[in-house]
Image (spheres, helix red, strand yellow):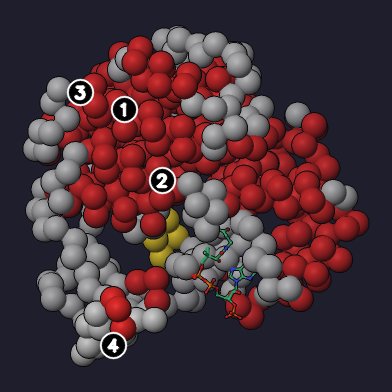
Amino acid sequence: MRKRIEELILEAGRKARAETSDEPEPQYTGDVEFPIECKVGRGLEGAVASTTKVGYVNGARGWLVYRGHNIFDLAAYSTYEETAYVLLFGALPTKSQLDEFKQELKSKRGVPAPVMEVLRQISPKTHPMSALRTAVSMLGNLDPNADDTSVEAETKVAIQLIAMFPTLTGAVARLRWNKEPLQPNPELDHAANLLYLITGDAPDELKERVLDIALILHADHGMNASTFTTMVVNSSLSDMYGSVTAGVASLKGPLHGGANERVLYDLEEIGEPENVDAWFAKADATKRKVMGFGHRVYKAYDPRARILGPLAGLLVEHHPHEAKLYKIATRLETVVCGKMAEKKIFPNVDFYAGLVYRAVGIETAMMTPIFAVSRVAGWTARALEYLGDNRIYRPRAIYTGPIHLDYRPMGSRG
Ligand SMILES: CC(C)(COP(=O)(O)OP(=O)(O)OC[C@H]1O[C@@H](n2cnc3c(N)ncnc32)[C@H](O)[C@@H]1OP(=O)(O)O)[C@@H](O)C(=O)NCCC(=O)NCCS
Protein backbone atom coordinates (compact mmCIF):
# COMPACT_ATOMS: atom_id res chain seq x y z
CA MET A 1 0.00 0.00 0.00
CA ARG A 2 2.79 2.46 0.93
CA LYS A 3 4.48 1.75 -2.42
CA ARG A 4 1.25 2.43 -4.35
CA ILE A 5 0.75 5.74 -2.49
CA GLU A 6 4.37 6.71 -3.13
CA GLU A 7 4.02 5.98 -6.83
CA LEU A 8 0.81 8.04 -7.12
CA ILE A 9 2.57 11.02 -5.53
CA LEU A 10 5.72 10.73 -7.64
CA GLU A 11 3.58 10.46 -10.76
CA ALA A 12 1.77 13.67 -9.72
CA GLY A 13 5.18 15.33 -9.32
CA ARG A 14 6.31 14.24 -12.80
CA LYS A 15 3.09 15.64 -14.26
CA ALA A 16 3.57 18.95 -12.44
CA ARG A 17 7.10 19.35 -13.78
CA ALA A 18 6.13 18.37 -17.33
CA GLU A 19 3.21 20.80 -17.50
CA THR A 20 4.85 23.89 -16.04
CA SER A 21 8.57 23.82 -16.82
CA ASP A 22 8.21 26.61 -19.43
CA GLU A 23 6.65 29.07 -16.99
CA PRO A 24 8.95 31.92 -15.89
CA GLU A 25 10.37 32.21 -12.38
CA PRO A 26 8.57 34.76 -10.21
CA GLN A 27 10.19 38.11 -9.44
CA TYR A 28 11.69 37.56 -6.01
CA THR A 29 13.77 34.56 -5.05
CA GLY A 30 17.13 34.51 -3.31
CA ASP A 31 18.61 37.30 -1.23
CA VAL A 32 17.06 40.76 -1.29
CA GLU A 33 17.75 43.93 0.60
CA PHE A 34 15.03 46.15 1.94
CA PRO A 35 13.58 48.51 0.92
CA ILE A 36 12.44 46.85 -2.30
CA GLU A 37 10.08 48.01 -4.99
CA CYS A 38 6.94 46.03 -5.54
CA LYS A 39 3.53 46.71 -6.97
CA VAL A 40 0.81 46.25 -4.37
CA GLY A 41 -2.76 45.39 -5.27
CA ARG A 42 -5.91 45.11 -3.20
CA GLY A 43 -5.69 42.50 -0.46
CA LEU A 44 -1.92 43.23 -0.35
CA GLU A 45 -1.48 41.27 -3.58
CA GLY A 46 2.16 41.51 -4.59
CA ALA A 47 3.29 42.99 -1.27
CA VAL A 48 6.44 41.51 0.28
CA ALA A 49 6.18 41.19 4.07
CA SER A 50 9.48 39.48 4.91
CA THR A 51 12.26 37.29 3.64
CA THR A 52 12.08 33.65 4.68
CA LYS A 53 13.86 30.34 4.39
CA VAL A 54 10.88 28.37 5.72
CA GLY A 55 8.95 27.77 2.53
CA TYR A 56 8.49 28.81 -1.08
CA VAL A 57 5.45 28.82 -3.34
CA ASN A 58 5.99 29.20 -7.08
CA GLY A 59 2.50 29.99 -8.31
CA ALA A 60 3.36 29.96 -12.01
CA ARG A 61 4.97 26.53 -11.92
CA GLY A 62 2.80 25.03 -9.22
CA TRP A 63 5.68 24.32 -6.87
CA LEU A 64 5.66 24.16 -3.11
CA VAL A 65 8.92 23.84 -1.19
CA TYR A 66 9.56 23.53 2.57
CA ARG A 67 13.12 24.43 3.56
CA GLY A 68 14.39 23.43 0.10
CA HIS A 69 12.49 20.13 -0.15
CA ASN A 70 9.78 19.86 -2.76
CA ILE A 71 6.35 18.84 -1.55
CA PHE A 72 6.18 15.75 -3.76
CA ASP A 73 9.26 14.25 -2.06
CA LEU A 74 8.01 15.19 1.40
CA ALA A 75 4.56 13.72 0.72
CA ALA A 76 6.04 10.54 -0.74
CA TYR A 77 8.73 9.87 1.87
CA SER A 78 8.27 12.02 4.99
CA THR A 79 5.90 12.07 7.96
CA TYR A 80 4.11 14.98 9.60
CA GLU A 81 6.45 14.88 12.58
CA GLU A 82 9.52 15.01 10.35
CA THR A 83 7.98 17.81 8.28
CA ALA A 84 7.20 19.85 11.39
CA TYR A 85 10.82 19.36 12.48
CA VAL A 86 12.09 20.52 9.08
CA LEU A 87 9.90 23.62 9.21
CA LEU A 88 10.88 24.53 12.76
CA PHE A 89 14.57 23.69 12.72
CA GLY A 90 15.53 24.16 9.08
CA ALA A 91 16.84 20.76 7.94
CA LEU A 92 15.92 17.08 7.83
CA PRO A 93 16.57 15.46 11.23
CA THR A 94 18.92 12.56 11.85
CA LYS A 95 17.23 9.40 13.09
CA SER A 96 18.01 10.21 16.73
CA GLN A 97 16.86 13.82 16.36
CA LEU A 98 13.58 12.63 14.87
CA ASP A 99 13.08 9.95 17.53
CA GLU A 100 13.69 12.55 20.23
CA PHE A 101 11.32 15.07 18.60
CA LYS A 102 8.57 12.45 18.23
CA GLN A 103 9.03 11.48 21.86
CA GLU A 104 8.84 15.11 22.93
CA LEU A 105 5.61 15.60 20.94
CA LYS A 106 4.11 12.47 22.50
CA SER A 107 5.05 13.61 25.99
CA LYS A 108 3.36 16.99 25.47
CA ARG A 109 0.02 15.82 24.08
CA GLY A 110 -1.86 16.05 27.38
CA VAL A 111 -4.06 19.14 27.78
CA PRO A 112 -4.58 20.77 31.23
CA ALA A 113 -7.96 20.00 32.80
CA PRO A 114 -9.14 23.67 32.92
CA VAL A 115 -8.95 23.82 29.12
CA MET A 116 -11.18 20.76 28.88
CA GLU A 117 -13.54 22.42 31.36
CA VAL A 118 -13.76 25.49 29.14
CA LEU A 119 -14.46 23.32 26.09
CA ARG A 120 -17.31 21.64 27.97
CA GLN A 121 -18.96 25.06 28.46
CA ILE A 122 -19.07 25.72 24.73
CA SER A 123 -22.32 24.97 22.93
CA PRO A 124 -22.13 22.02 20.49
CA LYS A 125 -23.59 24.41 17.90
CA THR A 126 -20.49 26.63 18.08
CA HIS A 127 -18.24 26.26 15.07
CA PRO A 128 -15.36 23.90 15.97
CA MET A 129 -12.81 26.52 14.89
CA SER A 130 -14.27 28.99 17.37
CA ALA A 131 -14.02 26.35 20.09
CA LEU A 132 -10.42 25.58 19.10
CA ARG A 133 -9.58 29.29 19.13
CA THR A 134 -10.89 29.60 22.70
CA ALA A 135 -8.97 26.51 23.80
CA VAL A 136 -5.65 27.85 22.48
CA SER A 137 -6.27 31.18 24.17
CA MET A 138 -7.06 29.40 27.44
CA LEU A 139 -3.84 27.38 27.19
CA GLY A 140 -1.97 30.69 27.19
CA ASN A 141 -3.73 31.75 30.39
CA LEU A 142 -2.46 28.65 32.15
CA ASP A 143 1.20 29.00 31.18
CA PRO A 144 3.07 31.12 33.74
CA ASN A 145 5.85 31.68 31.17
CA ALA A 146 3.52 32.76 28.35
CA ASP A 147 4.91 36.30 28.33
CA ASP A 148 8.49 35.16 27.77
CA THR A 149 8.83 36.12 24.10
CA SER A 150 12.41 34.94 23.60
CA VAL A 151 12.91 32.68 20.58
CA GLU A 152 13.89 29.88 22.95
CA ALA A 153 10.71 30.14 25.06
CA GLU A 154 8.44 30.55 22.06
CA THR A 155 10.00 27.51 20.37
CA LYS A 156 8.97 25.46 23.41
CA VAL A 157 5.42 26.81 23.11
CA ALA A 158 5.40 26.02 19.39
CA ILE A 159 6.30 22.36 20.03
CA GLN A 160 3.74 22.17 22.80
CA LEU A 161 1.01 23.57 20.54
CA ILE A 162 1.89 21.18 17.70
CA ALA A 163 1.64 18.31 20.20
CA MET A 164 -1.63 19.49 21.76
CA PHE A 165 -3.62 20.48 18.68
CA PRO A 166 -4.79 16.90 17.97
CA THR A 167 -5.90 16.52 21.60
CA LEU A 168 -7.84 19.79 21.48
CA THR A 169 -9.34 18.93 18.09
CA GLY A 170 -10.33 15.46 19.25
CA ALA A 171 -12.04 16.94 22.33
CA VAL A 172 -13.91 19.51 20.23
CA ALA A 173 -15.00 16.79 17.79
CA ARG A 174 -16.32 14.50 20.53
CA LEU A 175 -17.95 17.10 22.78
CA ARG A 176 -20.06 18.24 19.80
CA TRP A 177 -21.74 14.83 20.01
CA ASN A 178 -21.79 14.61 23.80
CA LYS A 179 -19.00 12.05 23.78
CA GLU A 180 -16.22 12.05 26.36
CA PRO A 181 -12.85 13.30 25.07
CA LEU A 182 -10.22 10.56 24.88
CA GLN A 183 -6.70 10.48 26.25
CA PRO A 184 -3.93 10.60 23.61
CA ASN A 185 -2.62 7.16 22.67
CA PRO A 186 1.19 7.01 23.09
CA GLU A 187 1.35 3.93 20.86
CA LEU A 188 0.20 5.98 17.88
CA ASP A 189 2.04 8.52 15.75
CA HIS A 190 0.68 12.02 15.17
CA ALA A 191 -1.82 11.34 12.35
CA ALA A 192 -3.08 8.04 13.74
CA ASN A 193 -3.43 9.55 17.22
CA LEU A 194 -5.44 12.46 15.75
CA LEU A 195 -7.86 10.08 14.08
CA TYR A 196 -8.08 7.96 17.21
CA LEU A 197 -8.87 11.01 19.35
CA ILE A 198 -11.73 11.93 17.02
CA THR A 199 -13.24 8.56 16.14
CA GLY A 200 -12.14 6.33 19.02
CA ASP A 201 -10.62 3.82 16.57
CA ALA A 202 -7.00 3.32 15.57
CA PRO A 203 -7.01 3.72 11.77
CA ASP A 204 -5.93 1.16 9.17
CA GLU A 205 -2.61 1.68 7.36
CA LEU A 206 -4.18 3.43 4.34
CA LYS A 207 -6.20 5.94 6.38
CA GLU A 208 -3.25 6.70 8.63
CA ARG A 209 -0.81 7.26 5.77
CA VAL A 210 -3.20 9.40 3.71
CA LEU A 211 -4.11 11.57 6.70
CA ASP A 212 -0.39 11.89 7.50
CA ILE A 213 0.21 13.08 3.92
CA ALA A 214 -2.70 15.53 4.14
CA LEU A 215 -1.07 16.98 7.28
CA ILE A 216 2.28 17.28 5.47
CA LEU A 217 0.61 19.09 2.56
CA HIS A 218 -1.13 21.65 4.78
CA ALA A 219 1.80 22.43 7.08
CA ASP A 220 3.03 25.63 5.44
CA HIS A 221 2.06 27.78 2.52
CA GLY A 222 3.76 31.12 2.10
CA MET A 223 2.32 34.33 3.42
CA ASN A 224 -1.30 33.17 3.51
CA ALA A 225 -3.84 35.05 5.64
CA SER A 226 -3.54 32.96 8.82
CA THR A 227 0.26 32.80 8.68
CA PHE A 228 0.49 36.53 8.14
CA THR A 229 -2.03 37.08 10.96
CA THR A 230 0.06 34.93 13.32
CA MET A 231 3.20 36.83 12.35
CA VAL A 232 1.58 40.26 12.70
CA VAL A 233 0.39 39.48 16.24
CA ASN A 234 3.74 37.94 17.19
CA SER A 235 5.64 40.93 15.77
CA SER A 236 4.23 43.16 18.51
CA LEU A 237 5.97 40.81 21.00
CA SER A 238 2.56 39.69 22.23
CA ASP A 239 2.89 35.95 22.95
CA MET A 240 2.83 32.75 20.89
CA TYR A 241 -0.50 31.57 22.30
CA GLY A 242 -2.18 34.84 21.30
CA SER A 243 -0.52 34.77 17.90
CA VAL A 244 -1.69 31.22 17.20
CA THR A 245 -5.17 32.02 18.57
CA ALA A 246 -5.35 34.76 15.95
CA GLY A 247 -4.08 32.34 13.30
CA VAL A 248 -6.92 29.92 14.12
CA ALA A 249 -9.44 32.77 13.84
CA SER A 250 -8.08 33.76 10.45
CA LEU A 251 -8.00 30.20 9.12
CA LYS A 252 -11.69 29.73 9.93
CA GLY A 253 -12.93 31.97 7.12
CA PRO A 254 -14.51 30.44 3.99
CA LEU A 255 -12.09 32.29 1.72
CA HIS A 256 -9.21 30.54 3.53
CA GLY A 257 -9.20 27.27 5.49
CA GLY A 258 -12.96 27.21 5.84
CA ALA A 259 -13.24 26.48 2.11
CA ASN A 260 -12.63 22.75 2.66
CA GLU A 261 -15.92 22.22 4.48
CA ARG A 262 -17.78 24.49 2.00
CA VAL A 263 -16.59 22.19 -0.81
CA LEU A 264 -18.40 19.31 0.83
CA TYR A 265 -21.58 21.38 1.22
CA ASP A 266 -21.38 22.23 -2.52
CA LEU A 267 -20.83 18.59 -3.51
CA GLU A 268 -23.79 17.54 -1.36
CA GLU A 269 -25.93 20.30 -2.84
CA ILE A 270 -25.10 19.01 -6.35
CA GLY A 271 -26.28 15.60 -5.18
CA GLU A 272 -25.65 13.50 -8.30
CA PRO A 273 -22.84 13.43 -10.90
CA GLU A 274 -25.34 14.20 -13.69
CA ASN A 275 -26.34 17.46 -11.94
CA VAL A 276 -22.84 18.93 -12.10
CA ASP A 277 -23.07 20.73 -15.45
CA ALA A 278 -26.37 22.47 -14.67
CA TRP A 279 -25.21 23.35 -11.15
CA PHE A 280 -22.03 24.95 -12.45
CA ALA A 281 -23.87 26.81 -15.23
CA LYS A 282 -26.08 28.42 -12.58
CA ALA A 283 -23.13 29.20 -10.29
CA ASP A 284 -21.29 30.79 -13.20
CA ALA A 285 -24.30 32.86 -14.27
CA THR A 286 -24.83 34.17 -10.74
CA LYS A 287 -21.07 34.75 -10.19
CA ARG A 288 -21.08 32.33 -7.29
CA LYS A 289 -17.57 31.25 -6.41
CA VAL A 290 -17.04 27.51 -6.61
CA MET A 291 -15.39 26.51 -3.34
CA GLY A 292 -12.06 24.73 -3.64
CA PHE A 293 -11.10 26.47 -6.89
CA GLY A 294 -8.88 29.45 -7.60
CA HIS A 295 -5.94 30.83 -5.69
CA ARG A 296 -4.24 34.17 -5.14
CA VAL A 297 -0.81 32.72 -5.91
CA TYR A 298 -1.29 29.56 -7.99
CA LYS A 299 -1.99 30.20 -11.62
CA ALA A 300 -1.08 26.57 -12.28
CA TYR A 301 -2.55 23.41 -10.73
CA ASP A 302 -2.01 23.48 -6.96
CA PRO A 303 0.55 20.69 -6.25
CA ARG A 304 -1.29 19.75 -3.07
CA ALA A 305 -4.49 19.13 -5.03
CA ARG A 306 -2.48 17.11 -7.56
CA ILE A 307 -1.56 14.79 -4.69
CA LEU A 308 -4.84 14.78 -2.78
CA GLY A 309 -6.98 14.07 -5.87
CA PRO A 310 -5.46 10.63 -6.59
CA LEU A 311 -5.30 9.86 -2.86
CA ALA A 312 -9.01 10.63 -2.50
CA GLY A 313 -9.55 8.22 -5.42
CA LEU A 314 -7.48 5.53 -3.71
CA LEU A 315 -9.37 5.97 -0.45
CA VAL A 316 -12.79 5.63 -2.06
CA GLU A 317 -11.60 2.47 -3.85
CA HIS A 318 -11.08 0.95 -0.39
CA HIS A 319 -13.75 2.84 1.57
CA PRO A 320 -16.50 3.36 -1.02
CA HIS A 321 -18.97 5.26 1.21
CA GLU A 322 -17.83 8.54 -0.40
CA ALA A 323 -17.62 7.19 -3.97
CA LYS A 324 -20.56 9.27 -5.22
CA LEU A 325 -19.17 12.53 -3.84
CA TYR A 326 -15.82 11.67 -5.42
CA LYS A 327 -17.50 11.17 -8.80
CA ILE A 328 -19.27 14.52 -8.44
CA ALA A 329 -15.95 16.14 -7.53
CA THR A 330 -14.03 14.77 -10.51
CA ARG A 331 -16.82 15.85 -12.88
CA LEU A 332 -16.90 19.32 -11.28
CA GLU A 333 -13.14 19.62 -11.74
CA THR A 334 -13.47 18.79 -15.44
CA VAL A 335 -16.28 21.30 -15.94
CA VAL A 336 -14.73 24.17 -13.94
CA CYS A 337 -11.24 23.74 -15.43
CA GLY A 338 -12.73 23.54 -18.93
CA LYS A 339 -14.87 26.65 -18.54
CA MET A 340 -12.40 28.74 -16.55
CA ALA A 341 -9.14 27.83 -18.27
CA GLU A 342 -8.58 31.42 -19.39
CA LYS A 343 -8.65 32.68 -15.80
CA LYS A 344 -6.23 29.89 -14.80
CA ILE A 345 -8.66 28.55 -12.23
CA PHE A 346 -7.71 25.07 -10.97
CA PRO A 347 -8.62 23.05 -7.87
CA ASN A 348 -6.79 24.24 -4.77
CA VAL A 349 -5.77 22.19 -1.73
CA ASP A 350 -9.26 22.39 -0.24
CA PHE A 351 -11.02 20.77 -3.15
CA TYR A 352 -10.00 17.17 -2.44
CA ALA A 353 -8.96 17.60 1.20
CA GLY A 354 -12.54 17.45 2.44
CA LEU A 355 -13.18 14.23 0.54
CA VAL A 356 -10.04 12.71 2.03
CA TYR A 357 -11.14 13.68 5.53
CA ARG A 358 -14.64 12.32 4.98
CA ALA A 359 -13.27 9.05 3.62
CA VAL A 360 -11.09 8.57 6.73
CA GLY A 361 -14.12 9.19 8.97
CA ILE A 362 -13.98 12.89 9.88
CA GLU A 363 -17.23 14.86 9.74
CA THR A 364 -17.43 17.97 7.56
CA ALA A 365 -17.60 20.51 10.40
CA MET A 366 -14.23 19.25 11.73
CA MET A 367 -12.29 19.74 8.50
CA THR A 368 -10.90 23.19 9.17
CA PRO A 369 -9.59 22.18 12.63
CA ILE A 370 -7.71 19.33 10.89
CA PHE A 371 -6.14 21.98 8.67
CA ALA A 372 -5.16 23.89 11.83
CA VAL A 373 -3.61 20.75 13.39
CA SER A 374 -1.20 20.79 10.47
CA ARG A 375 -0.73 24.51 9.82
CA VAL A 376 0.27 25.27 13.40
CA ALA A 377 3.75 24.07 12.37
CA GLY A 378 3.99 26.62 9.56
CA TRP A 379 2.51 29.43 11.65
CA THR A 380 4.97 28.94 14.46
CA ALA A 381 7.99 28.24 12.22
CA ARG A 382 7.49 31.52 10.39
CA ALA A 383 6.63 33.51 13.51
CA LEU A 384 9.82 32.20 15.16
CA GLU A 385 11.94 32.95 12.11
CA TYR A 386 10.62 36.51 12.03
CA LEU A 387 11.04 36.92 15.78
CA GLY A 388 14.77 36.28 15.35
CA ASP A 389 15.04 39.62 13.52
CA ASN A 390 11.78 41.21 14.59
CA ARG A 391 10.33 44.49 13.40
CA ILE A 392 6.69 45.24 14.22
CA TYR A 393 4.38 45.07 11.19
CA ARG A 394 2.91 48.44 10.42
CA PRO A 395 1.66 48.99 6.85
CA ARG A 396 -0.35 52.04 5.84
CA ALA A 397 -3.82 52.66 4.51
CA ILE A 398 -4.51 55.34 1.96
CA TYR A 399 -7.07 57.68 3.47
CA THR A 400 -9.89 58.42 1.03
CA GLY A 401 -12.22 60.42 3.32
CA PRO A 402 -12.58 64.18 3.83
CA ILE A 403 -10.07 66.10 5.96
CA HIS A 404 -11.15 69.64 6.76
CA LEU A 405 -14.72 69.19 7.99
CA ASP A 406 -16.18 71.70 10.45
CA TYR A 407 -17.09 70.33 13.85
CA ARG A 408 -20.80 71.19 14.03
CA PRO A 409 -22.28 71.47 17.51
CA MET A 410 -24.86 68.79 18.35
CA GLY A 411 -27.71 71.30 18.32
CA SER A 412 -27.12 72.22 14.67
CA ARG A 413 -26.93 68.62 13.27
CA GLY A 414 -30.68 68.20 12.85
C1 LIG B 1 -8.88 31.80 -3.20
C2 LIG B 1 -9.54 33.10 -3.60
C3 LIG B 1 -10.08 33.78 -2.33
C4 LIG B 1 -8.47 34.00 -4.25
O1 LIG B 1 -9.04 35.24 -4.36
P1 LIG B 1 -8.40 36.42 -5.23
O2 LIG B 1 -6.94 36.22 -5.42
O3 LIG B 1 -8.84 37.67 -4.59
O4 LIG B 1 -9.03 36.18 -6.66
P2 LIG B 1 -10.36 36.83 -7.19
O5 LIG B 1 -11.46 36.52 -6.27
O6 LIG B 1 -10.10 38.27 -7.49
O7 LIG B 1 -10.54 36.02 -8.55
C5 LIG B 1 -10.00 36.40 -9.83
C6 LIG B 1 -11.02 36.04 -10.91
O8 LIG B 1 -11.24 34.61 -10.89
C7 LIG B 1 -12.59 34.31 -10.54
N1 LIG B 1 -12.58 33.25 -9.53
C8 LIG B 1 -11.63 33.05 -8.59
N2 LIG B 1 -11.94 32.00 -7.84
C9 LIG B 1 -13.10 31.51 -8.32
C10 LIG B 1 -13.90 30.44 -7.94
N3 LIG B 1 -13.57 29.66 -6.90
N4 LIG B 1 -15.05 30.20 -8.62
C11 LIG B 1 -15.37 31.01 -9.65
N5 LIG B 1 -14.63 32.06 -10.07
C12 LIG B 1 -13.50 32.30 -9.40
C13 LIG B 1 -13.14 35.59 -9.90
O9 LIG B 1 -14.54 35.68 -10.03
C14 LIG B 1 -12.40 36.66 -10.67
O10 LIG B 1 -13.02 36.79 -11.92
P3 LIG B 1 -13.17 38.24 -12.62
O11 LIG B 1 -11.74 38.66 -12.87
O12 LIG B 1 -13.96 37.98 -13.83
O13 LIG B 1 -13.86 39.10 -11.60
C15 LIG B 1 -10.69 32.86 -4.61
O14 LIG B 1 -10.18 32.14 -5.71
C16 LIG B 1 -11.85 32.15 -3.97
O15 LIG B 1 -12.71 32.78 -3.37
N6 LIG B 1 -11.91 30.77 -4.10
C17 LIG B 1 -12.95 30.02 -3.47
C18 LIG B 1 -12.62 29.83 -2.00
C19 LIG B 1 -11.49 28.86 -1.78
O16 LIG B 1 -11.44 27.79 -2.37
N7 LIG B 1 -10.55 29.25 -0.90
C20 LIG B 1 -9.44 28.43 -0.53
C21 LIG B 1 -8.14 28.98 -1.02
S1 LIG B 1 -6.80 27.85 -0.73
**Whether residue 58 is situated above or below residue 240 in the rendered picture:** below
Q: Earlier in the sequence, mark 3 or mark 1?
A: 1
**Does residue 273 show up?**
yes
Which residue occupies the foreground of this view, 288 or 361? 288
Residue at the front extreme, as displayed = 411
Residue corresponding to mark 4? 402
Query: Marks 3 and 1, Cα distance to the nearest angstrom?
Result: 9 Å
Q: Residue 70 location, x and y as percent? A: 40, 51
Mark closer to the observer (4, 1): 4
Q: Secondary structure at mark 2?
A: helix
Q: Secondary structure at mark 4?
A: loop
Q: Looking at the rendering, which quadrant does residue 198 occupy?
A: top right
Amino acid of disc 1: Met
Earlier residue among tags 4 and 2: 2
Alpha-carbon neighbours of circle 1 within 10 Å: few (<14), some, or many (≥20)? many
| In this view, the mark in front (3 or 4) | 4
Q: Residue at x 54, y 68 (%)?
A: 300
Mark 1 element type: helix
**Residue in view at x 73 percent, y 73 percent:** 286
Q: Between label 4 and label 2, give the one nearer the viewer.
A: 4
